[in-house]
């Protein structure tokens, strides 16, 4: 019996690829990497990044060599901070070179275009001046296209640069022939111009305007396209900029500044007003409000104090804080967010995979069409100039650039915008699945509710003490209790009372299963479960608390019932709006919880959810998801706990609350960074807008070629117009994607949010 060898461990390596200009380049790099044993690659034209999955025994250097063999530049990522600096410097240098080349090209090309297009300005020997000006454009300005075309020829491949290079060379070569041998160089030569190509008198016609307009318009288009493409990644770069470079540490030596790389878990660092929190940590001293808007999209400042968790990248808007670091480097929440966004941008939607497959054969087909058009026109007895015009127009007008940019630019802009709003997706497949979801299974505790005990309502008898005094006395007694209900009462008393210290408590006693008691300001205070007959107001409050599945707590002062406090896990402020908006989007909400039936039914009734499943075990939630899917539903599951992980993994789409357990976040396809269920509605709408943008981009990219290539073949498109149209096509696709950067959720949650968020 032959032993089966274990499968080789796969690792993922990111490679920066340079020199790609269109979807044909993307296809070429992916095919070259795919020829290595066990290697698969996904290449993103918008970011210039190749994400390669390969066996551990395949060295990353061999991946770089494979890309270089395909005719492109490649490099492995360097240390993170060096990489960011090098990337920024590289982008700036590349942009500067592009701008300089474009400026010189415009200065040389514009006079040629004006003289060629306006016969009244054509003076004696004007054509020779145009030739002198056009030569540097056809050679130096178009040199990057020529180099990449020759590189592709050496590797038996053709890209968009091949078409641009051939169109420029053909136009300039014909013009040189006409000037030196065809009679166009004589003094007094005049040349009419029309946007529609037409046959002319033998060789006395120049195509210098095409020879300069093709490089000019393509360089202009790529310069604008490059700026726009860099704009789509602005959100990711803004996340990277939130990472601190230095941190002020407080230890036995006092305060001193160190590089963030030297900070260790457990060290205490200082965050002064206006400073950015250096890394994830927990407040040890001080109170303040922190601004999380750039990290999680939370619109309101969050109050923090001793014991509160802080997220690296947040801005301290209030007092001085001392923070103990709980995570550093790649383990911080900001690093995880950045990593999720980067991974999402590296993936491909199904539509883009189809576009890349088409682009792989597109350029060879265009070359074949151009040769066929030239041969057909010459064979039909047409003027050689008309045949050349049609051939060059076919070469220039074809545009696989737009095909390659249609999806990645939209995904880059959308995932960046999503991160700003607190929506973190794992990839384009997540957006596709989110758009198709018609049923969402919602967990209760920690998802629709806050997940911790809170005072929901206080009912006090009218009298001399008053509600505020009764709550203050109850909170004073409960501060000695470790029970969650007691802690909720104490927190409520501190939040609603004065800022002074709580009153002293004597004769404190705790009765398990009943409550606590103690003497405060000479009064005997008892806080515990209701018993015996109650006054009418308190009896009514007790009935209402039980109906809402809240825990009733009775406060007695010197043996007399004075108030009833309802404590429970209350709904998040945005839960009702979220469920209502999901229903309006055509998505059916289903409540599934491990809690008892009474609290589950109370939450469902408050939110208008008709289908409720209580006392669900983790296996029960997973079985419910399978049952819904078997019934034809496309199911998303929203949860935050370990018990939700199986259901999250088994759904069409798993959605985790950002403040939930790591295992739930790990099993999810989408994370709501700030733990606000209403963000889910934004995620659905953003996914639908993104997929709509991608479809519009691809429709334009395909439709453009379907219309323009036949026009060029039958001689109805001038090469100059073809060059302008080709460049405009790519710019329009990128500009359409950029609209996603400014996408805004409908409504304004900030105005309707009730209560303050708590960092947990």
Image (cartoon, rainbow, N blue to C red):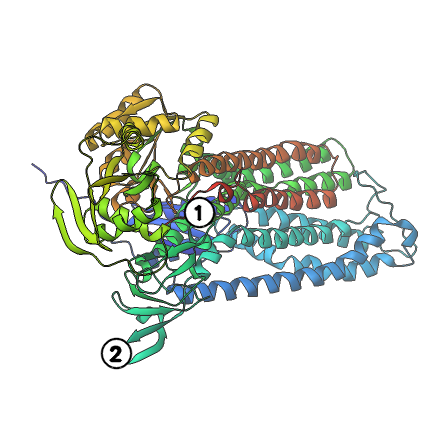
- In this view, 281 is above or below 259: above
Q: Which residue is mark 1?
A: 345
Q: Position of residue 521 (x, y in %)?
A: 24, 55
Among the 4 quarters of the image, the one containing residue 249: bottom left
Task: Using the image as rendered, state which of residue 540 and residue 230 is in the foreground.
Answer: 540
Q: Position of residue 696 (x, y in %)?
A: 57, 34
Pointer 2 residue: 252
Between 249 and 362, the one lying in front of the other is 249
Question: Label 2, label 1: how many angstroms apart (C-alpha)?
Answer: 45 Å
State the image quarter where residue 650 is shown. Answer: top left
Residue 703 in the image: state x and y as whole percent.
Answer: 61, 32
Residue 35 visible: no
Which of pointers 2 and 1 lies earlier in the amino acid sequence? 2
The foreground one among 310 and 76 is 310
Query: On the rendered structure, is 459 left or right of 6?
Result: right
Query: In the rendered image of this protein, does residue 126 appear above or below residue 193?
Result: below
Q: Nearer the viewer, residue 184 or 705?
A: 705
Residue 401 - label: none
Examine the rendered structure and indicate whether residue 203 appears above or below residue 319: above
């Amino acid at each position: 019996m032959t032993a089966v060898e274990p499968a080789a461990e796969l690792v993922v390596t990111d490679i920066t690829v340079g020199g790609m200009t269109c979807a044909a380049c993307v296809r070429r790099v992916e095919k070259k990497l795919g020829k290595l044993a066990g290697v698969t690659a996904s290449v993103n034209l918008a970011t210039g990044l190749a994400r390669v999955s390969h066996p551990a025994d395949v060295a990353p250097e061999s991946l770089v060599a494979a890309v270089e063999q395909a005719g492109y530049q490649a490099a492995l990522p360097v240390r993170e901070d060096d990489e960011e600096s090098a990337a920024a410097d590289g982008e700036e240098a590349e942009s500067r070179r592009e701008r300089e080349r474009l400026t010189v090209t415009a200065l040389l090309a514009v006079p040629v275009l004006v003289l060629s297009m306006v016969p009244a300005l054509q003076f004696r020997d004007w054509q020779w001046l145009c030739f002198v000006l056009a030569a540097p454009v056809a050679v130096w300005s178009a040199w990057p296209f020529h180099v990449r075309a020759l590189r592709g020829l050496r590797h038996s491949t053709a890209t968009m640069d091949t078409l641009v290079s051939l169109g420029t060379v053909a136009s300039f070569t014909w013009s040189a022939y006409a000037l030196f041998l065809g009679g166009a160089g004589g003094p007094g030569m005049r040349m009419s111009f029309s946007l529609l190509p037409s046959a002319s008198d033998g060789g006395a016609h120049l195509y210098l305007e095409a020879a300069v307009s093709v490089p000019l318009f393509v360089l202009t288009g790529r310069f604008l396209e490059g700026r726009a493409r860099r704009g789509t990644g602005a959100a990711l770069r803004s996340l990277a900029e939130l990472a601190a470079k230095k941190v002020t540490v407080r230890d036995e030596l006092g305060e001193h500044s160190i590089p963030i790389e030297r900070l260790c878990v457990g060290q205490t660092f200082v965050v002064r007003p206006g400073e950015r929190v250096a890394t994830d940590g927990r407040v040890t001293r001080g109170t303040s409000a922190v601004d999380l808007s750039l990290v999680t999209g939370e619109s309101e400042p969050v109050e923090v104090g001793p014991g509160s968790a802080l997220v690296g990248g947040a801005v301290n808007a209030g007092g001085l804080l001392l923070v103990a670091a709980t995570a550093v480097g790649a383990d911080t929440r900001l690093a995880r967010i950045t990593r999720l966004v980067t991974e999402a941008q590296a993936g491909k939607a199904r539509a883009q995979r189809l576009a890349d497959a088409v682009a792989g054969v597109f350029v060879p087909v265009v070359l074949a069409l151009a040769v066929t058009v030239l041969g057909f026109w010459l064979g039909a007895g047409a003027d050689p100039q008309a045949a050349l015009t049609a051939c060059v127009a076919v070469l220039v007008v074809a545009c696989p650039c737009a095909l390659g940019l249609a999806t990645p630019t939209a995904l880059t802009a959308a995932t960046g915008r999503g991160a700003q709003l607190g929506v973190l997706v794992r990839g384009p497949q997540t957006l596709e699945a989110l758009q198709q979801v018609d049923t969402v299974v919602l967990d209760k505790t920690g998802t629709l509710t806050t997940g911790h005990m809170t005072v929901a309502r206080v009912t006090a008898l009218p009298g001399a003490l008053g509600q505020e005094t009764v709550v203050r006395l109850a909170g004073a007694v409960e501060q000695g209790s470790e029970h969650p209900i007691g802690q909720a009462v104490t927190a409520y008393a501190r939040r609603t009372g004065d800022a002074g210290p709580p009153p002293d408590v004597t004769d404190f006693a705790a009765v398990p299963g009943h409550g606590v008691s103690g003497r405060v300001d000479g009064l005997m205070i008892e806080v515990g479960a209701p018993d015996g007959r109650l006054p009418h107001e308190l009896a009514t409050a007790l009935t209402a608390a039980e109906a809402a599945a809240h825990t009733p707590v009775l406060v007695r002062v010197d043996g007399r019932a004075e108030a009833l406090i309802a404590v429970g896990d209350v709904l998040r402020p945005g839960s009702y709006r979220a469920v209502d908006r999901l229903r309006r989007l055509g998505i059916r909400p289903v409540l599934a919880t491990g809690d008892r039936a009474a609290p589950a039914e109370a939450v469902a009734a408050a939110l208008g959810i008709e289908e409720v499943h209580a006392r669900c075990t983790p296996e029960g939630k997973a079985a419910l998801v399978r049952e819904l899917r078997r019934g034809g539903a496309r199911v998303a599951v929203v949860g935050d706990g370990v018990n939700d992980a199986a259901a999250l993994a088994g759904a069409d789409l798993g959605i985790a609350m950002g403040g939930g357990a790591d295992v739930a976040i790990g099993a999810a396809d989408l994370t709501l960074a700030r733990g606000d269920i209403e963000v889910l509605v934004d995620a659905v709408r953003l996914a639908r807008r993104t997929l709509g943008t991608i479809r519009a981009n691809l429709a334009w990219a395909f439709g453009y070629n379907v219309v323009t290539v036949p026009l060029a073949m039958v001689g109805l498109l001038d090469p100059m117009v073809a060059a302008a149209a080709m460049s405009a096509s790519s710019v329009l696709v990128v500009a359409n994607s950029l609209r996603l950067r400014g996408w805004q959720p409908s409504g304004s949650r900030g105005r309707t949010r009730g209560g303050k968020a708590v960092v947990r």
